Amino acid sequence: MKLEVCLPARVVFARGAIDRLGELAAPWGTRAALVRGGSHLERFGTLERVRSQLNAVGIDCVEFTFVGEPDTIAVDTATQLARKHACDMVVGLGGGAVLDAAKAVSGLLSLGGEALDYLEVVGRGKPIAAACAPMIAIPTTAGTGTEVTRNAVLTHKSSRFKASMRSVHLIARVALVDPQLTDSVPPRVTASTGLDALTQLIEPFVSTGANPWTDGISLQGVKLAARALPKAWENGSDQAARDDMALASLMGGVCLAHAGLGVVHGFAAPLGAMFPIPHGAACAALLVPGIEANVRALRQLDRAHPTLARFAQLGEILTEKRFATPQEAVDATVDFVRDLVHKLQVPTLSSFGVSASDTPAVVAAAKKASSMRYNPVVLSDQALEQCFREAL
């Protein structure tokens, strides 16, 4: 086994931690590129708190707003303006997509060139071998764990594909996680981002990259998310539930960065590029079909496959029950997640304009996604097609 742990130099996790932004940012520069999400940040006062914190320590802000999935053109435009204004640091404030954009801007600020120079699969894939501009990542949703990962996922519109800039140099200098910033997230977004967090705890635990270090984090995160997500969805002001989901999301980011993902994220990447579907919503719709596809394939391959024992372990963690046989525990995993998805009223892929006629194109793109290489079993085209259709 080989393991290299790559995390932010500092992770600050606390309710109200946003009020420490000034002291945390002060060492990194005097002009920040503030890469932020949409108008909800203004409605709930978050943006003003961030501006005040930075201004109080003499840091001027140049703001760039990202709504939806970040694409290479938008990132290049933001980077050019950040260079023009001599920004020497980046603050990312928003959901996972915004933090991806912020990481890309931090890289391009110091590296030069454009996003496609460093993008995998559809770009030139040049290595990022030098330090990037200092970045502070502040998530406002509990889902992707992007604040602690080393890649920036961007959409390349002309090829309708999502791919990553990837390097240890893209890791934020500080991950500032304040669960209070998620209190105002509406139920629909709480559901989709929360199920993305759960996916990013389950997939690394059963992936080919699973390892003892991430296993413990995955299982603890699954336990937190299984209990907290329904509570946060039902009552957004439940601070304990919001805190647990923010922590579960961070744990999921750690796990995916060090153990890989699988079929659910393999599909989510091209879907996000080809259709107007948020990443979390894609993962939420595909989570049950993805688990079922893997369980079917593993049972056909070897009913004593060690990964089935991992699915059984998940079943006991999720349900807090013991089962007479491993098969019953595996089935309990599927049943628990299916019931949770139903409870949270997760929309299907078809509600975003995806149809059965898109199957060949989506499956072909999913097979190229980097996440797919960590799936615990190689799924046939027929299995992938069935998985996709079940999510429609």
Image (spheres, helix red, strand yellow):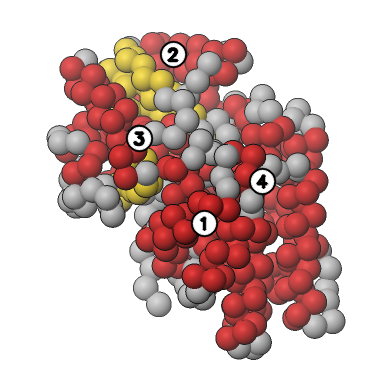
Front: mark 4 or 2: 4
Question: Is disc 1 in contact with disc 4, using a CB cutoff of under 8 Å?
Answer: no
Q: Which residue is mark 3?
A: 71
- The mark found on residue 348 in the picture is 4
Q: Earlier in the sequence, mark 2 or mark 1?
A: 2
Please give the name of the residue rendered at 40% of the width and 11% of the height, measured from the top-left corner. 56
Q: Give, as a three-letter code, the residue at label 4.
A: Thr
Residue 359, label in figure: 1
Q: Amino acid at mark 3?
A: Asp
Compared to 50, does 165 lie above or below? Answer: below
Q: Is residue 202 left or right of residue 8?
A: right
Q: Nearer the viewer, mark 1 or mark 4?
A: 1
Q: Secondary structure at mark 2?
A: helix
Element type at marker 4? loop
**Disc 1 crowd, CA 10 A, few/some/many (<14, 14-19, 20+):** some
Q: Earlier in the sequence, mark 4 or mark 2?
A: 2
Give the labeled residue for mark 2.
51
